[in-house]
Amino acid sequence: MVFLAEIGAIIAGLYMFTTQGFTILRARRTGVIISKSHGAARIERAIDPERFERVIAVRVRGLGPGLLFVAGGIGALFWMTIGLIQQQG
């Protein structure tokens, strides 16, 4: 059962990371990002470069929790696997 929780943490972290990551990559490529605020304002790099960079910086910081979930899930899975191997021998 613990293995399922570890695998679930890895999958959740990858989902969080990829959804934010693809949004950042698309915004860097196109120069347009849609804010998550009420009304979903469209921010263009050509019109407001400072605000665009601030929004991108916030989104990059948002990648951290996803990476922590992935790292924690992999670490726990590795630790559990080592424990099972030692228990067998």
Image (cartoon, grey):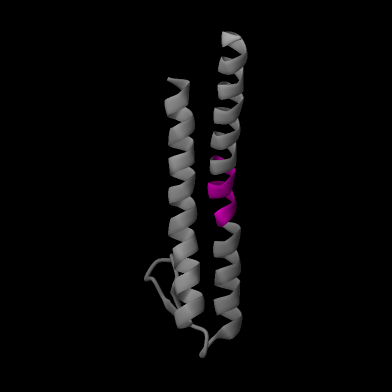
The residue that appears at 61% across and 81% down in the rendered structure is: 50
Residue 2 in magenta stretch: no
Please say if 44 is above or below 1: below
**Which residue, as the protein is rendered here, is positioned at the far front?**
89
Where is residue 21? Give x, y as percent: 49, 62
The magenta region covers 63-69
Residue sitting nearer the eye, 75 or 54: 75
Where is residue 25? Give x, y as percent: 49, 70
Q: How many badges with numbers are in the image?
A: 0
Toward which corner of the image does residue 71 lie, by quadrant? Answer: top right
Q: Is residue 65 left or right of residue 40?
A: right
Rendered-image quadrant of the C terminus: top right
The residue that appears at 47% across and 75% down in the rendered structure is: 27
Where is residue 31? Give x, y as percent: 48, 82
Toward which corner of the image does residue 62 lie, by quadrant? Answer: bottom right
**Which residue, as the protein is rendered here, is positioned at the far bottom?**
46
Residue sitting nearer the eye, 30 or 40: 30
The residue that appears at 43% across and 58% down in the rendered structure is: 19
Please say if 32 is above or below 67: below
Where is residue 35? Give x, y as percent: 45, 70
Rendered-image quadrant of the N terminus: top left
The residue that appears at 45% across and 28% down in the rendered structure is: 5
Please say if 34 is above or below 4: below
Q: Is residue 20 left or right of residue 79?
A: left
Residue sitting nearer the eye, 76 or 87: 87
